[in-house]
Image (cartoon, coloured by chain):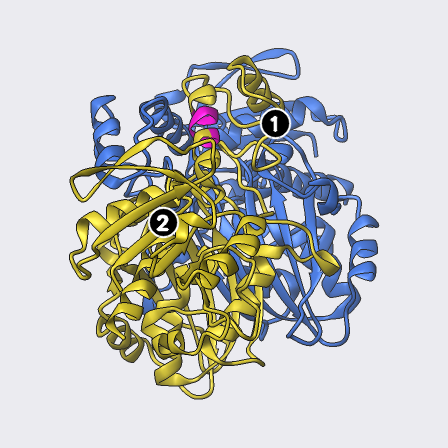
Chain colours: A blue, B yellow
């Protein structure tokens, strides 16, 4: 397998995919092909020291491609990942289009790498970035203690909404900065309007100096698509169809790196020291848990990093067999581009 | 009872206490006395349209005072609230000094107003702002359904660390704004240093473009003082010494208004419609729960407001008798100054 395509190469995740390919020399790809919408075709991006021209998404664009990594909207993936597969590529898709399809494996290599080999549709899905941010940690604990239930609350970065989300947060921060106005809705809205920003935004309401308890779209009974993804994808990845999950997904004014407060209940007794050993033994996890020295995971420490950072590990005082902890993962790297590329590496490794 | 003192009148909470006294005409106080550290004595503040000179904290300052509201550090309250009581005042204290003292009631008027009358030490405590932000909502649900367990994650504002916290966040936001640097630790730290801010801060690490999973001080087994306050104070206020609680307390780059993601388990079945009715019937709660119209509580909507805002009410899909919801409360108002003043009103009401 020697030709790798990036579909959605000019987006926020696509550009991190290129960074990762530049930095990792795990696979001697003979060609990296950059594919994007016709609007972006003709742009030239630097990959492994060479200029590569972006080509428009078409059936021909997949000629000779072995692995095609997609970071595109659900509708684009739904249409084009099967086309890539028909053309002989294995599609590794980071949209929500196929994640719950029983014929499409949903893979986090350190948890269920072996599932890349069962792909009847020629498509492998990459999990949602929020689920992914905690999955390395949960997979490791599950192997040791047997996971039963999860109650999680997220602190999700603006870049989860793509480049548009990053630009909007940066513009809002610039608009409110230095005004000393506090964060009353009227003052924040006025500063945003005075800076010439449109009143509608990817977040629906102001994100600067605010938190927004809504991500994705509304589904049944008041749950959001993002919250249901955390539940359903965690169950599928861990192979626990009856895992009990409640998630509250909240956007915070952070550019990059999702954080999650996790309350996880296991089949039997757990203790902090053993859990810390489990985390520390996992190559894709960095344990940062010395709160007495003000050392705990925070988003700014994790931006641009591959591992998941875990800390604030505590034994629940009133709930048996339960740990509380805090996890941070770069939502553009492990949460998206990195995990997708790790799946591609796993395919080549065979 | 006609003379009201504010001890700590020049702080962030003290100034909100003055705003509340100006706005509410519930009690015809004959005098509002402003008390602060000797450093602030002599300053003149406007109260109910008149200039009032701040006097230094001393035994004499309590002469003739009927109710003394304290918003001072624990050590100051520990020393001076008993002095106020000796001088014949009822001290209503917003520090942590007395909250768990069995001879000091811990009061949220809409939950346990009657307890203001049993105060053997002449002191009544006001709960921690994080606990208070969710207590009106939990008290109402508890009366209807019987509360058993709580798993909560907080999104706490900078002003929970006082004026110093507000100033630091505003300065950090101004330092990082417009740089377009993303939020890597190095870039954020460099921008903060370039703006001339000291490297130490009330939050220990950068708060702009970040979240900080640590508030208060470190206690046993990795728990923070803030997380234990949520547990212990909730139990005391609700009269449920065995209430099961796990809290993760996290600071977010919001100036004012604490938010909390709540996962609450009850003695018996609960449903969303009934819970919404319970919330809507409570005068101190505003239900904002139309996520299809992007209407849910966010901090900017609640700054300066007295009620607790509640929304995103969902029945847990996998946990029996359990609701998930999101709550926002102005940590300087209901979370501090307002609840303290409501206790004073309750005392006058007799």
Q: Position of residue B345 (x, y in %)?
A: 27, 65
Residue occupying the point 45% across, 38% down: B253
Which chain is disc 2 placed on? B
Considering the image in quadrants, where does the C terminus of chain A appear? top right
Which chain is disc 1 placed on? B
Q: Is A107 located above or below residue A272 in the figure?
A: above
Mark 1 lies on residue: B185
Q: Position of residue A335 (x, y in %)?
A: 58, 43
Sequence order check: which comes first, mark 2 or mark 1? 2
Circles 2, 1 touching at the beta carbon (< 8 Å): no
Q: Position of residue B288 (x, y in %)?
A: 25, 60
- Mark 1, Cα crowd under 10 Å, few <14 / some 14-19 / many 20+, is many
Q: Position of residue A123 (x, y in %)?
A: 56, 49
Mark 2 lies on residue: B6
Residue occupying the point 32% across, 63% down: B344
Most common secondary structure along the magenta stretch: helix
Please tell me in which quadrant of the rendered image residue B328 appears.
bottom left
Q: Nearer the viewer, residue B15 or A124?
A: B15
Q: Nearer the viewer, residue B240 or B205?
A: B240
Q: Which residues are magenta?
A: B168-173
């Amino acid at each position: 397998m020697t030709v790798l395509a990036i579909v959605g190469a000019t987006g926020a995740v696509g550009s991190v995919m290129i960074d990762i390919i530049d930095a990792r020399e795990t696979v001697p790809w003979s060609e990296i092909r950059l594919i994007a919408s016709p609007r972006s075709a003709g742009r030239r991006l630097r990959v492994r020291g060479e200029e590569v021209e972006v080509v428009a998404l078409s059936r021909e664009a997949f000629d000779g491609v072995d692995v095609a990594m997609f970071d595109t909207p659900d509708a684009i993936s739904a249409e084009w990942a099967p086309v890539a597969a028909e053309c002989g590529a294995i599609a590794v898709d980071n949209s929500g289009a196929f994640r719950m399809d029983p014929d499409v494996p949903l893979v986090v290599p350190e948890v269920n790498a072996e599932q890349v080999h069962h792909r009847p549709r020629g498509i492998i899905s990459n999990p949602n970035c929020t689920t992914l941010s905690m999955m390395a940690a949960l997979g490791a604990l599950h192997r040791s203690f047997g996971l039963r239930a999860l109650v999680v609350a997220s602190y999700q970065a603006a870049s989860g909404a793509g480049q548009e989300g990053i630009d909007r947060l940066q513009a809002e921060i610039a608009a409110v900065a230095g005004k000393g106005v506090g964060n009353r809705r009227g003052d924040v809205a006025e500063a945003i309007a005075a800076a010439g920003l449109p009143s509608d935004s990817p977040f629906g309401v102001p994100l600067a100096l605010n938190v927004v308890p809504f991500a994705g779209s509304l589904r049944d009974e008041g749950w959001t698509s993002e919250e249901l993804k955390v539940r359903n994808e965690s169950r599928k990845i861990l192979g626990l169809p009856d895992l009990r999950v409640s998630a509250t997904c909240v956007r915070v004014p952070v550019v990059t790196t999702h954080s999650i407060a996790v309350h996880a209940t296991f089949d039997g007794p757990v203790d902090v020291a053993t859990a810390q050993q489990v985390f520390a033994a996992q190559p894709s996890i960095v344990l940062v848990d010395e709160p007495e020295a003000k050392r705990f995971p925070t988003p700014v420490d994790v931006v641009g990093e591959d591992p998941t950072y875990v800390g604030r590990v505590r034994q629940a005082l009133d709930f048996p067999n339960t740990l509380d902890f805090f996890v941070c993962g770069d939502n553009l790297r492990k949460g998206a581009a990195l995990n997708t590329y790790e799946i591609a590496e796993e395919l080549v490794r065979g």
